[in-house]
Amino acid sequence: MTTAAEEPTPRRRGRPGKDQATVLREAIELFNLQGYDATSMGDLAARLGFTKSALYHHVPSKEHLLQRALDEALDGLSEVVAAAQADTSATALERLRRAIRNSVDLLIDHLPAVTLLLRVRGNSPAELAALKRRRELDAQLAQLVAEAAAEGGIRTDIPPDLISRLLFGMVNSLTEWVRPSGRISPDTIADALTAMAFEGLLAH
């Protein structure tokens, strides 16, 4: 009879330092660098120092990696919007503002995955599903905008769906230049974007 200390350690898939999380991070970087369609499993295997067959031991397909990457970005954004919607103790304007600020934090924390999300064009089932989820997020944010307008918190002369697209557009534009290790801190960026967006939306 073996003791707990003598129990064999479960075998991990992959080589040391090359677990599935590492494979996903490298795949996202390569998809962003070369484009998803232009990247082969052979390219990814070479980047990781694997044989192609060893890479398939980690993941079943290139689209599986794409799906996981898009889910990383979309799950985070969905949580941000859902949390803002659920906070009934705050005004609609406060919830909307929080959703936008936390979206900036999420984008910076998951910059490679969000960058990849914004580049998909619907060329595969995973991309089509991601685009559908993005439209749903736009609709949820537009609902928050409409509630804030109905409460008198923001101006009413711009359609809510247009405001939501402009707000998300401001956030998404950060992928073009922001760097988590840059000289401007993520908090400063989030505060500045939120202030600029909402001071221009205040009712008057």
Image (spheres, grey):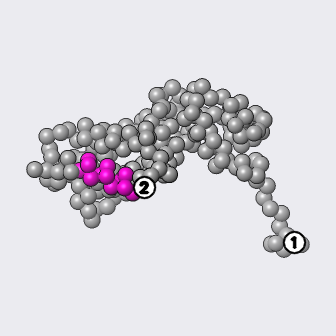
Q: Of marks 2 and 1, which one's residue comes earlier in the chain?
A: 1
Q: Nearer the viewer, residue 177 or 11?
A: 177
Q: Please state the horizontal and vertical placement of residue 154, each as a whole percent of the image.
A: 17, 50
Q: Is residue 155 left or right of residue 112?
A: left
Using the image, determine if residue 6 lies above or below residue 167.
Answer: below
Mark pair 2, 1: CA separation: 52 Å
Q: Residue at x 36, y 44 (%)?
A: 171
Q: Please state the horizontal and vertical placement of residue 123, each as a whole percent of the image.
A: 51, 26
Per the rendered image, the range of residues in magenta is 185-198
Q: Residue at x 17, y 51 (%)?
A: 202
Q: Please state the horizontal and vertical placement of residue 41, each as a whole percent of the image.
A: 68, 31
Question: Amino acid under label 1?
Answer: Thr
Question: Amino acid under label 2?
Answer: Ser
* Residue 194 counted in the magenta span: yes
For label 2, count other residues whose C-alpha is less than 10 Å away and answer few (under 14), some (14-19) or many (20+): few
Using the image, determine if residue 103 lies above or below residue 43.
Answer: below
Q: What residue would you read off at disc 2?
A: 185
Q: What label does residue 109 carry, if any? A: none
Q: What residue would you read off at disc 1?
A: 2
Secondary structure at numbered mark 2: loop
Magenta segment's dominant SS is helix
Q: Residue at x 47, y 28 (%)?
A: 122
